[in-house]
Image (spheres, rainbow, N blue to C red):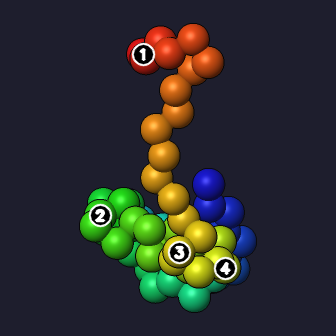
Amino acid sequence: MANFIINGVTVIDLEISQLIVLTFGLPAMTPASFYSTNLVANLATLLGVSVNMIRRVDIVSANGNNR
């Protein structure tokens, strides 16, 4: 959504791009680059935690059923 108030002959160029812009110390990047091989580092930076605090786990139900 974009709102503009223009007065007179003002020209506005609106450019739309597929970028994730975060103000948490990460540069602007495409969704594909955020979820690339640097996902753990990107998530750690986003959350403000150390990389070794991010874990990938497999959740298994109590009865052992996998979906």
Q: Which residue is mark 3?
A: 52
| Amino acid of disc 4 | Gly
The single residue placed furthest to the front in the displayed view is 63
Q: Which residue is mark 2?
A: 36
Quadrant assignment, res 31: bottom left
Quadrant assignment, res 62: top right
Q: Which residue is mark 1?
A: 67
Q: Earlier in the sequence, mark 4 or mark 1?
A: 4
- Whether residue 65 sits left or right of residue 38 in the image: it is right
Q: Calculate the distance from the C-alpha at mark 3 to the C-alpha at mark 1.
A: 28 Å
Asked which secondary structure carries label 2, the reply is loop
Q: Calculate the distance from the C-alpha at mark 4 to the C-alpha at mark 1.
A: 32 Å
Q: How many marks?
A: 4
Residue placed most toward the observer, 44 or 20: 44
Q: Earlier in the sequence, mark 3 or mark 1?
A: 3
Q: Residues within 10 Å of mark 2 (few under 14, many from 20)?
A: few
Q: Which residue is mark 4?
A: 48
- Whether residue 62 sits left or right of residue 27 in the image: it is right
Residue 44 to residue 54: above or below: below
